[in-house]
Image (tube, rainbow, N blue to C red):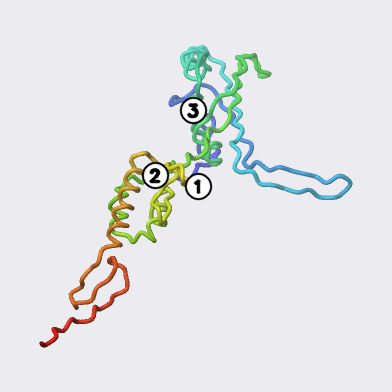
Amino acid sequence: MEIPHWRAQPGLWDELMLAGRVWPGLAKITVKGGQDIDVKKAAGAHGAQLTYKGYAPKDVSIVLRFWTPEHWIEIQKRMPDIEPKPGKKTLEPLDITHPVTKVRNVKAIAIKDITGPDESNVRNCYELKISAIEFFPPAKKKATVTPTRSLVDALNSTPLSEAGAIVRGLMIPVDPVTGLTNTDPDFATNDGPYSAADAAALSKAAAARAEEDKKIVTWADGSKSVGPKGKHYTEPSKTESKP
């Protein structure tokens, strides 16, 4: 939405909405800042190395000027909304609306300090000065979640030689031959989260799979193999000897 010009709507530029309420009097808002840049100048040389360190919350300065008895009554009513409270462990952001903050994309602030009310240099006026910083917390990082699907199902459908890769995909290291995980004293690595139940399931599934790989499997074409993945072979036919 386009912000009206101060000559077209001067009252809009004089008003401040803070903490959900319009404040009385005249408001002057200043917003400063934008980027955090580290400047490293080499001794005895021209120029400097600039390192961008991210977006920096902007500084917001508010000056409220008021003069009528009605202004003063309303100021007193609104002060508890912005006055910092002792005992608080977290910052309370306050919404702010003004043409200056809108054009600078500042939607909420955290108040650092308040000065006044003090007598203004304008006759019969008082001023309240508020120093604040844009409330712009960093985005929360997504937590890493360890999958909990059945490891037995994964291993039962996978050759033992590939079991290590699948279980490592689940962040549970396993030896592809012995089926041991890093919960076992014989397994040297320690590179992922696991549980005792998973370790027991892995060992049991690996042992069962190893037994399956030793069995003779007879296929539909009459060929056989040692285990379901073994090389097919055909036994020589037996012929009866005539007396």
Of tags 2 and 1, the one toward the viewer is: 1
Mark 2 vs mark 3: give the one in front.
2
Q: Which residue is mark 1?
A: 189
Q: Which is closer to the viewer, label 1 or label 3?
A: 1
User: On the image, numbered disc 3 is attached to which residue?
Assistant: 93
Disc 3: CA contacts within 10 A as few (<14), some (14-19) or many (>=20): some
Give the farthest residue toward the front: 243
Residue topped by disc 2 = 146
Q: Nearer the viewer, residue 115 or 149?
A: 149
Q: Where residue 95 sits: x, y (%)?
A: 47, 30
Q: Quadrant of the C terminus?
A: bottom left
Mark 3 residue type: Pro
Q: Which residue is located at x 43 percent, y 26 percent?
A: 20
Secondary structure beneath dot 2 equals: loop
Of the numbered discs 2 and 3, the one sitting upstream in the chain is 3
The residue located at (53%, 33%) in the rendering is 13
Residue at image coords 20%, 71%:
218
Spot occupied by residue 238 in the image (x, y as percentages of width and height):
18, 81
Q: In the rendered view, does 233 fall on the left or right side of 174?
A: left
Asked whether 60 or 142 is in front, the reply is: 142
